Image (cartoon, helix red, strand yellow):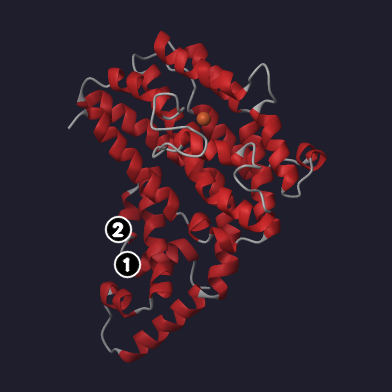
């Protein structure tokens, strides 16, 4: 198996984790107000997309890689049409967030933190892997995950606000253009080097001649994933507490009480999970996933020890809903 294929499989795993994030798992339940608030916050990341890529170019030694990024910047800012930032404002206005509201809004602290995390991905580092690291990170954080995010946004905006794919000038084209599984579609954009995501392939393939370089790329796309997710976590915390504590968490903790009351000896966590209804089980599995993500983020084995035990729920939720 070629190394680029291995790298791509690693990316696919991150995509799977992305869609498993609680925010996207219950995306259609988010209120209109919360949906607009999230998209308004997202504006602060999209607004600075070009300067983010531009900074990556400045530190990039590889001419072909620079060309890939330059071409994307060019697409974002055509000379004969509105820029993608203007297009984004147009879509936001269509769904009820007028331009003056977007432009006068303020980024939350979490959005500012996410932006700093994303910015850090393109920091120049004086080592031979700078180019590979930055290219792997931008493909994940700037292209692949953006499309995966809009995979949820596009149908919701059509369902709620009638922003159909032919009316949308930002979200729909970005989804169709950047997704990894792009195939020939209504926009005439196919599985071809012309898509932003695919335009990284030749360069990344050349920059990964051995397993050591593959490891650098995998590590970097993982960091890019974490940086992206740090933006969504701000909507999930409140959202999870609000929704899950009202439904799944209460049901799940009642189930725990009933189960414990039934047994004299300490129950095994696996037996307990098996006894739950799927919606209740999701609550516990969520806590486990959080432990694994915390471990990946911090490297602290304590989180690994807690995963798969009742301790994971305590760690994620405190003593109880
Ligand atoms: Fe793109």
Label 1 crowd bin: few (<14), some (14–19), many (20+), radius 10 Å: some
Q: Identify the residue at image location x=46%, y=13%.
A: 66
Which residue is the extreme one toward the left?
1
Residue 33 - label = none
Q: Identify the residue at image location x=71%, y=57%.
A: 33
Pointers 1 and 2 in contact (C-beta within 8 Å): yes
Residue 282, given in percent of the width and then of the height, sits at: 41, 68
Which residue is the extreme one toward the right?
100
Residue 165, given in percent of the width and then of the height, sits at: 59, 44
Residue 124, given in percent of the width and then of the height, sits at: 47, 17
Quick one: 203 or 158, which is closer to the camera?
Answer: 158
Residue identifier under label 1? 309
Q: Is residue 141 among the parts visible in the rendering?
A: no
Quick one: 264 or 201, which is closer to the camera?
Answer: 201
Label 2 crowd bin: few (<14), some (14–19), many (20+), radius 10 Å: some
Q: Identify the residue at image location x=29%, y=22%.
A: 205
Res 315 quadrant in image: bottom left
On screen, 258 above or below 115? below
**Label 1 element class:** loop
Q: Is residue 199 among the parts visible in the rendering?
A: yes
Q: Give me the C-alpha separation between circle 1 and circle 2.
A: 8 Å
Q: How many marks?
A: 2
Residue 265, given in percent of the width and then of the height, sits at: 26, 85
Res 35 quadrant in image: bottom right
Residue identifier under label 2? 305
């Amino acid at each position: 198996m070629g190394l680029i294929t291995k790298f791509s499989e690693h990316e696919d795993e991150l995509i799977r984790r992305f869609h498993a994030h609680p925010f996207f798992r219950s995306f259609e339940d988010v209120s209109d107000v919360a949906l607009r608030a999230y998209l308004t916050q997202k504006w602060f990341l999209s607004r600075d997309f070009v300067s983010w890529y531009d900074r990556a170019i400045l530190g990039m030694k590889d001419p072909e890689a620079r060309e890939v990024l330059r071409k994307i910047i060019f697409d974002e800012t055509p000379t004969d049409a509105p820029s993608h930032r203007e297009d984004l404002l147009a879509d936001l206005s269509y769904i009820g967030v007028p331009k003056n509201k977007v432009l006068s809004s303020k980024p939350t602290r979490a959005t500012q933190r996410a932006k700093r995390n994303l910015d850090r991905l393109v920091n120049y580092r004086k080592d031979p892997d700078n180019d590979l690291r930055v290219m792997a990170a931008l493909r994940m954080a700037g292209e692949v995950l953006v499309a995966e995010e809009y995979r949820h946004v596009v149908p919701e905006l059509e369902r709620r606000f009638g922003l159909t794919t032919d009316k949308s000038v930002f979200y729909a084209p970005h989804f169709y253009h950047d997704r990894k599984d792009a195939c020939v579609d209504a926009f005439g954009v196919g599985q071809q080097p012309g898509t932003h995501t695919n335009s990284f392939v030749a360069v990344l393939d050349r920059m990964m001649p051995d397993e050591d370089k593959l490891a650098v790329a995998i590590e970097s796309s993982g960091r890019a994933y974490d940086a992206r997710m740090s933006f969504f976590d701000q909507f999930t915390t409140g959202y999870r507490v609000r929704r899950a504590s009202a439904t799944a968490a209460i049901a799940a903790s009642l189930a725990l009480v009933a189960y414990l009351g039934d047994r004299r000896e300490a129950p095994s966590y696996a037996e307990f999970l098996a006894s739950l209804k799927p919606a209740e089980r999701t609550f516990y599995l969520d806590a486990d996933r959080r432990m694994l993500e915390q471990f990946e983020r911090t490297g602290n084995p304590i989180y690994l020890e807690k995963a798969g035990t009742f301790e994971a729920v305590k760690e994620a939720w405190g003593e109880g809903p």
